[in-house]
């Protein structure tokens, strides 16, 4: 594991503030002037200390080496009345406090801004390990992404809204304890996991890291809720991949089965197809158990594959721009195909291309999470929503991107690549996804115009594409015990 996470950032930020001018004008950013890299025995735990946030209410014991980190931005409460749908009549004067674990990542960043805009009080908890994976594997987002500090300062400068920041590892329970005591969340949205199936299949150490990081991190969150915020609602990001591809309809979490004359409603069978997916299955079991045993309230969002990059908030300024992964380890199907089309690389269809999955626009990710927060689970309830809006096969996506590419003058071809994964390439797939729609989700459907804009976006940044990162290099069958370097 040492080779994986052997560096730990201790950074001192410059005292200069980032100021972002109005949307569509350039942002002046003062970057950190002092940055020190050190080797740590206990990596990716507690990283940056700048200003401590005083705990609310209860007194907080701070251990010597645990630092609750916050941004050097003003913490005054926003006194504007909230018009968000999240406020209950009982508590209409208090803004709901939402802790977003993994808030520097692809889904988490977009969600943090959206919730902040909706007038929730938001804190991001992240250990920045996703940025470290890029360094380790020689990868980079298609889009240039600003540091989390600059992102948050820019948001403050544009909107006047604070986002608190806690940098550290949720596998470190002391760190998590400090963040819970300091921020006192009403809701925890948990995105903070290693989320790539190929990454978990690179070698033994990445498989072990993925399961440890994801399962222990989630277990710690459950214990923190039990110990410090027992009424807090956990909104946990799972994946549609937990279900696998059964030859029957996929229900939303539960299925009623009649067996030998008796009937019961049981958790829907899970068939994870990578060590990553299996970590999510284990998370779901641990959450379901603690709902039953401790009365925790939880929503498991079985999310489909997310596409797109822009949300109303991230497009307010270039410093707020989200990441977009196109490489074979972290990139997901439609995003990858758009970037491949933009640079004239054939679309990489794995095997027969009949693999069918649920997909959703990132603008719907943020909408779904807000709906789950605004309509919390009951104490003791383990609620499961299938979070996607449309189903496509890989061949469907390739055909859609080819057609959209031609419209904007791109010459798009398709290449059948030997499938590096172990999965059915032609199969039945029909997954239910009605619960979020019943709560009010208004889906963004993948239309020609949306594809055009995603493709144009990929074209805009095509000079940043490293073509060596496009072809798959991780094989489900060839995974071995020895640490492997992926990038060519
Ligand atoms: N992106 C998708 O298409 C997709 C699809 C289905 C489900 N999901 C789920 O949604 C969640 C977010 O996905 P994403 O694409 O935004 O991933 P991401 O890798 O971009 O973001 C995850 C964030 O969590 C942080 N993190 C990881 N481990 C942590 C730890 N131990 N402590 C603190 N922070 C930690 C990372 O640094 C990163 O910023 C994941 O749980 C993923 O499984 C994503």
Image (spheres, grey):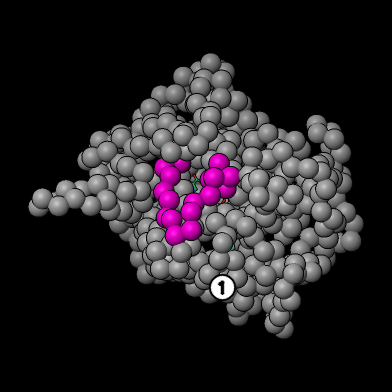
Residue 58 position by quadrant: bottom right
Q: Nearer the viewer, residue 313 or 233?
A: 233
Residue 130 position by quadrant: bottom right
In what quadrant does ligand 1 lie?
A: bottom right
Is residue 315 one of those drawn in magenta? no
The answer to whether residue 204 is above or below residue 453 is below
Name which residue lies at 35% across and 37% down: 432
Give residue 99's position: percent from left, percent from top. 64, 57
> Of all residues shown, which one is farthest toward the front?
90
Give residue 438's position: percent from left, percent from top. 46, 34
Give residue 485's position: percent from left, percent from top. 48, 61
**Neighbour tally class for label 1: few under 14, some 14-19, many 20 plus, Cα within 10 Å:** few
Q: Secondary structure at mark 1?
A: helix
> Of all residues shown, which one is farthest toward the right?
16
Is residue 382 one of those drawn in magenta? yes
Give residue 182's position: percent from left, percent from top. 71, 68
The answer to whether residue 227 is above or below residue 317 is below
Name which residue lies at 74% across and 69% down: 57
Residue 183 position by quadrant: bottom right
Q: Which residue is mark 1?
A: 227
Disc 1 residue: CB within 8 Å of ligand 1: no
Answer whether residue 374 is visible to the viewer in this image.
yes
Counting the numbered discs, the total is: 1
The answer to whether residue 74 is left or right of residue 300 is right
Q: Nearer the viewer, residue 150 or 267?
A: 267
> Of all residues shown, which one is farthest toward the left?
260
Answer whether residue 362 is visible to the viewer in this image.
no
The answer to whether residue 267 is left or right of residue 370 is left
In the image, which residues are magenta?
Answer: 371-387
Name which residue lies at 74% across and 42% down: 82
The answer to whether residue 160 is left or right of residue 323 is right
The answer to whether residue 277 is left or right of residue 26 is left
């Amino acid at each position: 594991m040492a080779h994986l996470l052997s560096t730990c950032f201790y950074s001192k930020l410059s005292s200069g503030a980032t100021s972002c001018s109005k949307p569509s004008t350039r942002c002046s950013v003062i970057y950190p002037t002092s940055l020190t890299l050190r080797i740590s025995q206990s990596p990716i735990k507690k990283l940056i200390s700048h200003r401590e946030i005083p705990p609310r209410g209860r007194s907080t014991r701070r251990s010597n080496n645990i630092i609750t980190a916050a941004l050097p931005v003003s913490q005054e409460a926003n006194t504007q009345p909230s018009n968000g749908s999240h406020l209950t009549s009982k508590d209409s004067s208090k803004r709901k406090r939402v802790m977003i674990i993994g808030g520097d990542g692809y889904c988490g960043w977009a969600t943090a801004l959206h919730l902040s805009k909706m007038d929730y009080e938001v804190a991001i908890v992240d250990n920045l390990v996703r940025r470290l994976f890029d360094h380790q594997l020689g990868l980079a987002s298609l889009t240039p992404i600003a540091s989390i500090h600059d992102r948050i300062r820019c948001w403050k400068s544009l909107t006047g809204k604070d986002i608190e920041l806690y940098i550290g590892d949720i596998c470190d329970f002391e760190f998590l304890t400090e963040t819970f005591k300091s921020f006192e969340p009403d809701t925890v949205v948990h995105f903070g996991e290693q989320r790539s199936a190929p990454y978990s299949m690179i070698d033994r150490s990445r498989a072990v890291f993925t399961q440890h990081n994801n399962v222990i991190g989630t277990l710690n969150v459950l214990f923190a809720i039990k110990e410090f915020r027992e009424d807090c609602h956990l909104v946990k990001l799972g994946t549609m991949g937990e279900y696998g591809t059964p030859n029957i309809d996929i229900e939303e979490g539960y299925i009623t089965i009649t067996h030998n004359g008796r009937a019961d409603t049981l958790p829907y069978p899970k068939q994870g197809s990578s060590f990553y997916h299996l970590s999510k299955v284990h998370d779901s079991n641990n959450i379901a158990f603690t709902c039953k045993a401790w009365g925790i309230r939880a929503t498991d969002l079985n999310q489909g594959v997310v596409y797109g990059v822009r949300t109303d908030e991230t497009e307010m300024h270039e410093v707020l721009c989200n990441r977009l992964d196109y490489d074979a380890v972290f990139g997901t199907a439609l995003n990858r195909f758009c970037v491949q089309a933009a640079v004239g690389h054939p679309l990489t269809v794995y095997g027969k291309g009949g693999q069918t999955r649920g997909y959703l626009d990132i603008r719907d990710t943020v909408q779904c999470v807000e709906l789950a927060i605004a309509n919390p689970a009951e104490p003791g309830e383990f609620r499961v929503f299938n979070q996607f809006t449309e189903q496509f096969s890989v061949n469907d996506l390739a055909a859609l991107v080819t057609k959209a590419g031609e419209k904007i003058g791109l010459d798009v071809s398709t290449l059948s690549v030997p499938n590096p994964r172990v999965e059915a390439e032609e199969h039945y797939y029909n997954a239910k996804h009605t619960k979020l729609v019943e709560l009010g989700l208004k889906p963004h459907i993948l239309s020609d115009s949306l594809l055009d804009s995603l493709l144009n976006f990929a074209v805009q940044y095509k000079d940043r594409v490293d073509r060596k990162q496009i072809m798959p290099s991780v094989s489900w069958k060839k995974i071995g015990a020895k640490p492997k370097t992926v990038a060519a």
